Amino acid sequence: MLSGSFPVGLASILRAQLAWIALALCMALTTAYADNPTFNNELNYLGSSGLFFTPSGSSLDYGEFHFSYSSFADSSYRYQVAPGDSIYDGNTYSIASSPFPGLEIGLSNIGYDLSASSDLAANIKYSPTFIPDNWFDLSIGAIDLGGETGTQSAVYGALSKQFGRFRLTAGTGTQKQSNTLARYQGGFAGIEYQPHETLTLLAEHDGANTHYGLRLRTPQHWMNGKTQVFGSVMLGTDLDGAAANHFSLGVRTSLFSSSSIKFAQSEPLESSIKDALPWLFASVPASANRVEIPRGEEPGDHLPLIERLGRLKRIIARHGFEDVWVGQEAGRLFVRFENSIFNRNQIDALGLVLGEVAQRTAEDITDIDITLSRYGVPSLRFSVSAAALVEFYGKGSRLPALVALVPAVKSMGNSMGNALWVGGSMGQFLKPRVSLSPQFRYFLGTELGVFDYSLALRSSVELPLWPGATVSADYDHKVSQTPDFERGRSFYRWSMPSRWTNVELRQVLKLPLNVYGAVGVGQFKGIYRENFDGVFGEALWQSPNGIHQISVRGGRYQSNEYDGLVREVGVGRYRYYWSDLDLSISLEAGQYWRQDRGGRVEFAFNFGDTKAHFFIQDTGYQKVGIAFTAPLGLRRDMAPRLGQLKGSSEVRLGAQTMVNNDSGCNCLVPGRAQDGPGLSYLSRQVFNRDRLSVEYIRVNQARLREAFRLWGGR
């Protein structure tokens, strides 16, 4: 009997129908298909790109995210299977993505019953991109990398070659554990035949057994060309004890958000990577087509200076920006503003304002000086050539050099040097900002179930008081949770009840030498009976171009539940921004919230407003993990007239698994390497989720024109 969420009868009917549909498509569409199709790379039953069990010589396409479900479970928990059932009937959930061309990283959760135990396995695969496309595809990889109890642990090498509508794969490998199937050992081979873009026929020998079947997918142009649904059916196998009709179902989509990029289009970031590292690729594509934006209304050179500045100020403020000031000194135009409408990414605000300025720049202006602030504290300042900026927006040329400047605090109503200023009031204060976001606590791959969760809806209220000062509070409303989070069950202490969770008062300061500081006090509620009063602080320095960043954060928290219980947190962090890859590499070490000590290395790749995180941490137990952060809500929020309601700028979901533990323990150790309450505010809020720098703007310059094309010139 097939366990999990698919009833036996429904599963059998689904498999049979898929088989008949595929055969009909094969007969009807073969003659109308290209002789040299592109073979898609989709996840197999083990969570790596390939056939059923054998890996292919290529990896997932750059910037893609895949999620799949398989009814096949190759797990060590065979003792849980009821008599008469197949030991391979179960549930395998896999996620994988490609954060760098040729690189594939993923996690699989393998188990039988959804309410019983399961196991997490980390996978990695690399296919060199310097091999010419007309040669062959080569890959090396590892399954269940560093796993403690996994039965799939293996390393392999695979080679694939396409011949028209056929793709042949061969390779070899070895497995770590002797009590599992001897897959890959002695060599494996597979063949794929793709008569149509929606259908592929598969046959393979994985080194131990032979399998054959088919794979179906939706046409690539469906769902706006950004998402595909795929599935497979194994119609035959000689694997002892396995059913012949296991199936999988998955989704393939792009990580790139806030853009019109589709599967078939060249990615601007990929072109940037190839330009920066040409030796790593077989071919370097031509630069992306430039987009021209027609010049708007005349800049009004004939108008008096104060009227010209006032008109530009009104145009910028009309978009919903706050505390807008425009000034001029000789040939230099100053623009200062606060953004609270583009909360997903500040680059949209900069693109819109720069576009409006470029459309209306007078001929006597040579340089433009831009300052972006948050609640009265300047966080980014740069200058740019006025003529070159006009060319960038008007003729589609490359973004001119942005000269990083030290942000200066300006007393409203006073001048900077001898500049004449026209501006509005400090209207950003005493306006409540309310954001809504889901809050999860969850456990994957435990002895209690495949996936246990507690879900709440968090309403966060932030009220700016004076420059740099805010008071904020979070209220969680319980939405749903699995039985293991109920009172008396194993995960009860991690459940998320309805309650006020955090209350904070914080002051952010702009210090000398381009250092930012934040100090605060608050009350924080975490898991069951975690109720602390705390004082906290952090300091951050970022190099002028944004390449380097150093920060320290810490706090002291006194329990309100247990006398004498004090938690002290202190963490130092260095972040390097590799602009060619739009990648942040961070190293941090110290003492974390649960008083665990150690360090963490993280690689965070930017894909529009989405980030893919891959990390290794060691605070007594070594773990590797994958996570994704993405905004939830509109790209442009409502203007804060009397207040503001918006979505969350960052929701994070991920998974991690323990590796290299000498004791062989695969136990749960939740909450390790966890930040203290109230910390990392500077990086997340003041510095735009660690993306506020001239170097990040240069890498994502196409986003500037896109923002102005969508919302500018009105």
Image (cartoon, helix red, strand yellow):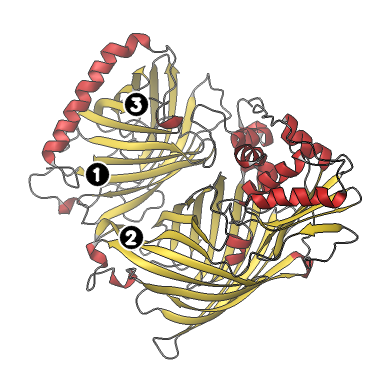
Q: CA distance from mark 3 to mark 1?
A: 22 Å
Q: In terms of sequence position, does the residue under pointer 3 or pointer 2 come before the other? A: 3
Q: Nearer the viewer, residue 227 or 8?
A: 227
Task: Count residues near mark 2 (Cα–Cα under 10 Å), then give few for <14, some for 14-19, many for 20+.
Answer: some
Residue 556 visible somewhere in the drawing = yes
Is 385 on the left-hand or right-hand side of 231?
Answer: right
Q: In terms of sequence position, does the residue under pointer 3 or pointer 1 come before the other? A: 1
Disc number for residue 73 = 1
Q: Position of residue 469 (x, y in %)?
A: 63, 73
Q: Three-letter amino acid code at disc 3?
A: Ala
Would you place residue 40 above or below residue 634 in this image?
above
Quarter the C terminus occupies: top right
Of circles 3 and 1, the one toward us is: 1
Disc number for residue 443 = 2
Point 69% across, 32% down: residue: 293
Q: Total label count? A: 3
Q: Three-letter amino acid code at disc 2?
A: Phe
Q: Position of residue 195 (x, y in %)?
A: 34, 16
Q: Position of residue 350 (x, y in %)?
A: 68, 48
Of circles 3 and 2, the one toward us is: 2
Quarter the N terminus occupies: top left
Q: Three-letter amino acid code at disc 1?
A: Ala
Residue picked out by circle 3: 189
